[in-house]
Image: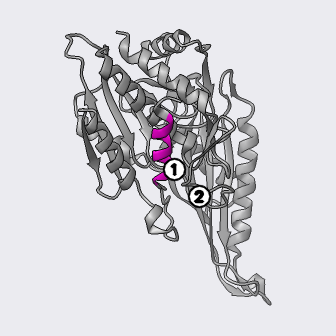
Amino acid sequence: MGPAIPYLRDYVAIPSVNPMGRSDLPKEIVGEAALAGHLESQLRRLSVDAQRVGDAERPSVLAEVRTGEPGASTILVASHLDTVPVDGMEIPPFDPVVEGGKLFGRGACDTKAGMAALVAALERVLSRGILRRNLILVGEADEELGSIGVRDVLAHLGDRRPDWVLATEPTDLRVVHRHKGVVHVRMEARGVACHASNPSAGKNAIVLLSRAALALDALAEKLTAHADPELGPATLSVGLLHGGHAPNVVPDHGYLVADRRLLPGESLQSARAEFEQALAEAGVSDSVELTSCSLEKPTLSTPVDHSAVVCCAAALRAGGQPGETAGVAFGTDAGVFEAAGVPGVVLGPGSILRAHTSREYVEIDQVEAMTDFFVELLSTP
């Protein structure tokens, strides 16, 4: 095995859990600071100029390596440092185990494998003196929730923007050039509390929310009528519904949170208009308020003939991989970069079907193939 696997084991062994708004997680596993410090030191040992940017507790790592050649292209490779929480995991999340050609642990494929492959490749390229592209290496914080890390990095770079970006999410080594966007909406119902022995004296917030949820379900059915040939239909799912105090109290308040997946060409504004119309059609717009509607991840839509797609596919094929292009349903920070004016692709080892799971793992041969890919990409002008 090459150096990428030992690097990956080190990364997985360092907890970097995104709290995702929770306050019940052990402090010693929360945040990216420990992993960011490890990565920063590792890069500096390679004589790479690396630094932490952003909040001290939730930092991102930014490193720049330049060829010194006039006119060399500049690419930004971003691999997020944070992971989802570890509730319900069936394996020790921070004790990486290699078994059956796989490495197990939280973050193994999502996305510490991508960073391990990049660092191993960079080490090889620098030792051989074959760097032909300028590289901005980013280990980003908070990809799993709010993309704070990307915004910190973009603010630090200012006008120094790369030609394109590669986000190392698990894609089974396919070049993903299009993906859906993510909108989250929160709706709150305001009712009137009273004793359950006389419910007509009150106004039941849970009933109102239920009507809103059914209206969203009907909207979700409508969305299936218009599908993207590559990405499929836009989707809508109610993921949280909460309300009530006790069985003998008519609830006066409740809320729900829903997830809407956008297709390229749709927007936060168009999604919000759909939600408002759904509430109106259900007759609850006077009692159920749309309290927040936020764009979590923008869509990605990079033309298949863009240099990012062409170069990545060619580098994969040079290493014996198919170099397939694809679209996916999940959102990534490549969409955030695109919204900021930097086009790009998503590419990495492992399957999205293994991400966030109770037995998360990545295939070792894919990590090694990703390392070879990065060597080819960085050493080819």
Magenta stretch in the rendered image: 5-14
Q: Pick the residue in front: 326 or 4.
A: 4
Left or right of 12 in this view: 121: left
The percent position of residue 11, horizontal first and vertical second, equals 46, 46
Above or below, 341 relative to 26: above
The percent position of residue 104, horizontal first and vertical second, equals 62, 45
Residue 8 is covered by the magenta coloring = yes
**Three-letter residue code for mark 2:** Val
Assess whether mark 2 and mark 1 are in contact (beta carbons under 8 angstroms): yes
Residue 86: which numbered mark, if any? 2
The percent position of residue 326, horizontal first and vertical second, equals 61, 21
Left or right of 332 in this view: 76: left
**Three-letter residue code for mark 1:** Thr
Q: Tell me, yes or no, if residue 74 can be seen here.
A: no
Above or below, 198 relative to 84: below
Q: Pick the residue in front: 273 or 226.
A: 226
Label 2 crowd (10 A; few <14 / some 14-19 / many >=20): many
Residue 83: which numbered mark, if any? 1
SS under mark 2 = loop
Residue 364, quarter of picture: top right
| Quadrant of the image containing the C terminus | top left
SS under mark 1 = loop
Label 1 crowd (10 A; few <14 / some 14-19 / many >=20): many
The percent position of residue 378, horizontal first and vertical second, equals 37, 18
Residue 232, quarter of picture: top right
State the separation of the CA atoms marked 1 and 2.
Answer: 9 Å
Left or right of 327 in this view: 165: left
Residue drawn at (46%, 49%) of the image: 82
Outermost residue to the front? 1
Residue drawn at (64%, 75%) of the image: 191
Residue 364 is covered by the magenta coloring = no
Residue drawn at (48%, 60%) of the image: 19
